[in-house]
Image (cartoon, rainbow, N blue to C red):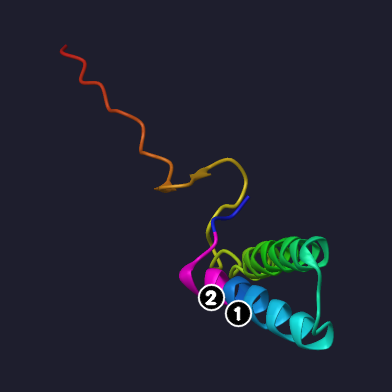
Amino acid sequence: MPHPTPAHLAYGSATVISTTFVSLLLVQDAPGPVAVLIAVVALVLGAAVTLAAARHQAGRRPAAPAGEATTGERTATGPAPAPRRTHVRA
């Protein structure tokens, strides 16, 4: 699972703040349980937006350049290391 970037966290935070603000404006005299429910729904929605943005970006990674192997020869840190050469003395 990809890690969220600061931009993803900003999207999620903006979602939480705007959802809470709009919901509390719509329900002006919200009793305690309703306010708690609004806060929980806003937090869940913010987390969903953050994770969805991170997954969306992970799906848009560029393809491997032409000529590069894409099956097993490439690791997370780069191409596979060259095999060691052994010197045989005659």
- Disc number at residue 10? 2
Q: Determine whether, in the image, residue 13 is placed left or right of residue 19.
A: left
Q: Which residues make up the magenta segment?
A: 4-10
Residue at x-position 61% and y-position 67%: 63
Q: Nearer the viewer, residue 26 or 76?
A: 26
Front-most of 27 and 66?
A: 27
Residue 35 placement: quadrant: bottom right
Whether residue 9 appears in magenta in the rendering, the answer is: yes
Which residue occupies the extreme left position in the image? 89
Q: Which residue: 20% across, 20% down?
A: 87
Identify which residue is drawn at 68% across, 65% down: 59
Q: Which secondary structure type mostly characterizes the magenta part of the structure?
A: helix
Crowd class of label 1 (few under 14; some 14 to 19; many from 20; radius 10 Å) = some
Q: Quadrant of residue 46?
A: bottom right
Q: Amino acid at mark 2?
A: Ala
Measured from the top left, where is residue 49 in percent x and y?
70, 69
Query: In this rendering, would 84 be left or right of 70?
Result: left
As measured in the structure, the alpha-carbon distance from the residue carrying label 2 to the one carrying label 1 is 6 Å
> Which numbered tag is attached to residue 14?
1
